[in-house]
């Protein structure tokens, strides 16, 4: 038997060699708990993220738009399942994770607590919210925990259509009538700062960042990813004649990136702690869906049980 | 909220074969109550973009795995047998097709 110290050295060595940690490998308890928290909340975000968009499925402006939105929302559900499975390899059950979500103990991305008021919001979500998520997820493809990394690779492959369809919606509106362009601009105005919040608090105030970097769960910090996102997104807005709602936005040649106004971190704290515009509605919808599915799970379990007996008898 | 433990089905591992002739590759896992549901859930979760022509599902508890702690002793019998590799043998350059 190896001592805890020896096991820890093996673990550190693997991280330093850019090797992956797999479910059966020894890992520090704090690493395990960090991953459970991060992966389960990532899964919850995928699942809750279906709600703001689901709101527009029945009101999509064309059959094509409806098909695309259905496919996208179905993907989000699938992504939630990949991630729940990855978290389960760490020894937590799906039940425990769902309980933590429904009781409010586990968080999900604050972005999904904002309402989708117009069709342009569906464009803004695909373009900005999925764009920000991709930036984070591309980095996480190289995360140190094998099952999480594999889920991210799969998700990234599927996610790029999400961002492109969103940009297409924005582009069509921005190049349409003045009213349509105004609708697109209004959506950008409302989603810009909440999207910047998605990368998490500034590095100086991020409670989990140091551990995540040390363990190579994350490879870039919140602020680095946020800067990358702004640099990438501003030209995309300019191309379709929309204006990023930040009077201080300015190219900084020295750092080869934009200077920009940070989001209102007080608002972030309010929303993440349960007091955003839609927190109660989102959680209520999740709990309702879960409870209304209960009889299906019970029937499926009973059917499987009955079927098992029949096979044994024959 | 449920106080009883809610039944989410059991865990199954999913393997996909993209085309005939290719090996089956592990894709991930799903929850299901029986074989039929396991196949359907695997299809819906892992093959939304033509990733497979055949799907295998296996109850996770039927998988037997070696353990990382045994990596040394378990694979040791093969580690020192470099003569199993073709590059161990010296063949003159003049010899072709070998």
Image: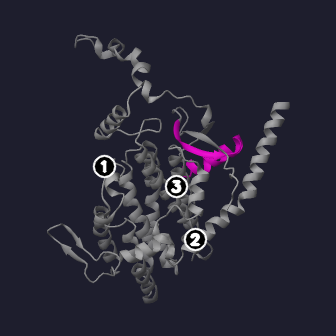
The chain letter for the residue carrying disc 3 is A
* Pick the front one: A185 or A172: A185
Q: Secondary structure at mark 2?
A: helix
Q: Secondary structure at mark 3?
A: helix
Range of magenta residues: B25-49
Q: Does the CB distance between marks 1 and 3 fall below 8 Å?
A: no
The answer to whether residue B15 is magenta is no
The numbered disc on residue A79 is 3
Residue B98 visible in this rendered orientation of the protein: no
What is the x, y in percent for residue A162? 47, 63
Q: Secondary structure at mark 1?
A: helix
Question: What residue does disc 2 label?
Answer: A282
Residue A314, above or below A35: above
Q: Is residue A255 left or right of residue A94?
A: left
Q: Quadrant of residue A103?
A: bottom right
Instruction: Quarter of the image for the C terminus of chain A: give it.
Output: top right
* Residue at x 41% of width, y 73% of height: A268
Q: Of callouts 3 and 2, which one flags the residue occurring earlier in the amino acid sequence?
A: 3
Residue A171, above or below A223: below
Instruction: Quarter of the image for the N terminus of chain A: give it.
Output: top left
Furthest toward the left, the residue is A254
Q: Of callouts 1 and 2, which one flags the residue occurring earlier in the amino acid sequence?
A: 1
* Pick the front one: B94 or A109: A109
What is the x, y in percent for residue A198? 40, 67
């Amino acid at each position: 038997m190896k001592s805890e110290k020896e096991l820890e050295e093996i673990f550190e060595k693997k991280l330093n060699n850019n090797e992956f940690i797999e479910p059966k490998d020894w890992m520090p308890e704090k690493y395990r708990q960090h991953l459970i928290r991060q992966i389960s909340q990532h899964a919850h975000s995928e699942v809750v993220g279906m709600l703001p968009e689901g709101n527009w499925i029945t009101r999509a402006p064309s059959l094509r738009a409806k098909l695309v939105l259905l496919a996208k929302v179905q993907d989000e559900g699938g992504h939630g399942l990949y991630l729940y499975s990855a978290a389960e390899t760490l020894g937590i059950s799906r039940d425990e994770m769902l309980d933590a979500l429904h009781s409010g103990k586990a968080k999900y991305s604050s972005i999904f607590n904002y309402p989708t008021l117009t069709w342009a919001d569906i464009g803004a979500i695909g373009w900005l919210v999925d764009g920000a998520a991709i930036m984070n997820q591309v980095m996480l493809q190289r995360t140190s925990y094998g099952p999480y990394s594999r889920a991210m690779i799969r998700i990234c492959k599927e996610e790029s259509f999400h961002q492109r369809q969103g940009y297409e919606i924005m582009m069509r509106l921005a190049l349409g009538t003045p009213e349509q362009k105004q609708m697109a601009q209004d959506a950008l105005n409302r989603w810009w700062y909440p999207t910047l919040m998605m990368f998490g608090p500034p590095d100086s105030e991020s409670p989990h960042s140091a551990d995540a970097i040390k363990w190579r769960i994350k490879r870039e910090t919140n602020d680095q990813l946020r800067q990358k996102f702004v640099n990438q997104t501003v030209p995309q807005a300019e191309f379709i004649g929309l204006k990023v709602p930040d009077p201080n936005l300015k190219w900084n040649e020295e750092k080869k990136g934009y200077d920009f106004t940070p989001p209102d971190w007080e608002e972030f704290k309010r929303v993440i702690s349960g007091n955003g515009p839609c927190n109660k509605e989102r959680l209520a919808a999740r709990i309702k869906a879960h409870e209304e599915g209960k009889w299906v799970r019970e029937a499926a379990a009973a059917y499987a049980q009955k079927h098992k007996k029949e096979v044994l008898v024959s | 909220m449920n106080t009883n433990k809610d039944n989410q089905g059991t865990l199954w591992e999913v393997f996909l074969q993209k085309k005939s002739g290719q090996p089956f590759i592990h894709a991930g896992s799903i929850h299901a109550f029986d074989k039929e549901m396991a196949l359907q859930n695997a299809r819906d979760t892992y093959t939304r973009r033509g990733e497979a022509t055949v799907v295998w599902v296996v109850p996770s508890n039927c998988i037997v795995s070696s353990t990382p702690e045994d990596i040394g002793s378990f694979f040791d019998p093969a580690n020192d047998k470099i003569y199993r590799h073709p590059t161990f043998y010296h063949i003159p350059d003049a010899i072709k097709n070998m």
